[in-house]
Image (tube, rainbow, N blue to C red):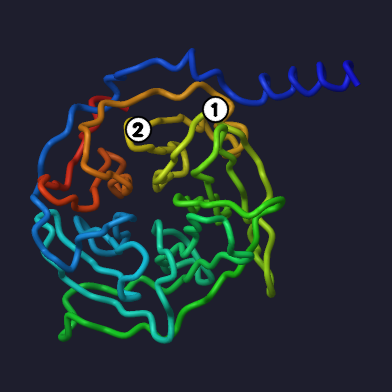
Amino acid sequence: MRIVMIVFVCFFFTSCFDKKSISSDSDLFKTSKQLAELKNSKLEEISGLAASAINPGLLWVHNDSGNPAVVYLVDENLNIRLSCRLKGVKNRDWEDIAVGPGPESNKRYVYVADIGDNNSRHDVKYIYRFEEPQAGLKSREVTISAFDTLAFKLSGEKKDTEAIMVHPVTQNIYIISKREKPVHVYELSYPFGNGILTAHNVATLPLSQIVGADISADGEEILMKDYDNVYYWDAKGRPVGEALKDNPLVLHYTEEPQGEAIGFKTDGSGFYTLSETVKGERTFLFYYERNSR
């Protein structure tokens, strides 16, 4: 038994980084710039953000559980340009959103992650995928009835999860657990198939409270955030599970009331963060511009 335990400990500490060795305050990105203050009551519980691929300068956002099953396309002043209601869907606990490839190679798709589970009681999680619509339609409100539903379980126990990433090359989807330490990164491997899928653990990180994540449009960079820090990995062309074994950089981050949303700008020149609103505190859309690449 002792030999088994020693082997396990050695494997664990060689398969993930040591949080004590994380560098801090990397200058890869500049400090934050306030783009707009969040004042629209329709956007009070934002928990996910992703840059649009076909609407330059616009962002997809959505609210947390208990709100309508609506995805909003906003500009950098947080003006709503388009509202997309998913027909027949309930917002059980929408926690993150991504934009990436899908069934047709010449199109881009929005992935809405109904993956939250504060009490770890749901057997199945859901991701809704629909073709990304363009702004500038005659109507500012549309109903999305053509979408795919990806139903899946995590391998092992039920867990709360609040962050997803969609790889722009492989189309694999990654889901990160929240309420544990260390957190685990799970992978849904493309092609997904039918029925209830299983997301398998591909990485373990000595972090906790991961509430948002994104992967760059070229698949080379990874962001994750908790309530206090933003973490960055350079994938260098490696699979996500391998890249996450590296020590991440800790980027400049301006404290937010309840910051759960993060996303790269489509051209990779920076990233955005946005918080839920908290009574008595001001909330802003922040942008962090890249210093160098």
In the depicted structure, whether residue 9 falls above or below residue 60: above
Q: Residues within 10 Å of mark 1 (few under 14, many from 20)?
A: some
Does label 2 or label 1 sit earlier along the sequence? 1
Give the side of residue 11 with respect to residue 122, left or right: right
Query: Which residue is disc 2 drawn over?
Result: 230
Q: What quarter of the picture does the C terminus occupy? A: top left
Q: Is residue 4 visible?
A: yes
Query: Do the CB atoms of the residues marked 2 and 1 lie less than 8 Å apart?
Result: no
Which picture quadrant has residue 131?
bottom left
Residue at the image position 47 percent from the left and 70 percent from the top = 129
Find residue 33 and report its image quarter.
top left
Task: Look at the picture and state if 211 lies above or below 234.
Answer: below
Pick the front one: 161 or 14? 161
Q: Name the residue type under label 2.
A: Val
User: What amino acid does circle 1 point to?
Assistant: Pro
The percent coordinates of residue 184 (x first, y second) are 59, 40
What residue appears at the point 58 percent right and 34 percent down from the top-left corner? 238
Q: Position of residue 143 (x, y in %)?
A: 32, 85
**Residue 229 image offset from top left, x and y in percent:** 34, 30
- Check residue 206 in the rendering and tell me which mark sits there, or answer none: 1
Above or below 117: residue 237: above
Q: Which residue is at 18% across, 68% downward?
A: 42
Please give left or right for residue 95 compared with residue 138 in the image.
Answer: right
> Which callout, 2 or 1, points to the residue nearer the camera?
1
The N terminus lies in quadrant? top right
